[in-house]
Amino acid sequence: MTFFKAILAWLVIGVILGGGIFMTVHPKSPSWFPLLIVVVGLVAVIGKFGCLPPSDEHHH
């Protein structure tokens, strides 16, 4: 089940990044802010959850 959750997570990340890129190159109102916000948010989320130690490792 973890494998499928990982695939789902990467699909969601891809859709969000794709939306940010689309809004950046949108012909009617191009803007760098959506892509910037998405990239900063992605880095923050990966830094927060991707760098956590395993749950069985306790440092008290």
Image (cartoon, grey):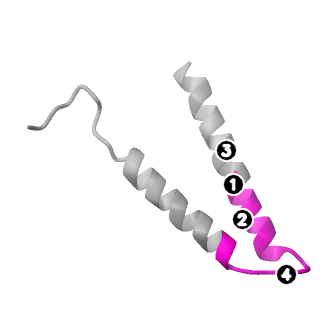
Residue type indicated by callout 4: Ser
| Residue located at (74% from left, 67% from top) | 21
- SS type, badge 1: helix
Estimate the spatial distance between the alpha carbons at disc 2 and disc 1, rounded to whole Å.
Answer: 6 Å
Q: Is residue 50 visible?
A: no
- At mark 2, the secondary structure is helix
**Earlier residue among tags 4 and 3:** 3
Contact (Cβ within 8 Å) of mark 4 with mark 1: no
Which amino acid does the dot numbered 1 rest on? Ile
Residue that sits furthest to the left in the current view? 60
Q: Which residue is mark 4?
A: 29
The residue positioned 66% from the left and 77% from the top of the image is 33
- Give me the C-alpha separation between circle 1 and circle 3: 6 Å
Residue 36, located in which quarter of the rendered image? bottom right
Mark seen at residue 50: none
Residues shaded magenta: 16-34
- Circle 3 Cα neighbour tier, 10 Å, few/some/many (<14 / 14–19 / ≥20): few
Tag on residue 12? 3
Q: Quick check: 18 above or below 51?
A: below
Badge 1 is on which residue?
Answer: 16
The residues bearing labels 4 and 1 have C-alpha atoms spaced at a distance of: 18 Å
Q: Are marks 1 and 3 in contact (CB under 8 Å)?
A: yes
Task: Kindly identify the amino acid type of the residue bearing the numbered disc 3.
Answer: Val
Q: Amino acid at mark 2?
A: Gly
Visible residue check, residue 19:
yes
From mark 2 to mark 4, how far is it between C-alphas?
A: 13 Å
Disc with the residue nearer the chain's start (2 vs 4): 2
Seen in the picture, residue 51 relative to 27 is either above or below; the reply is above
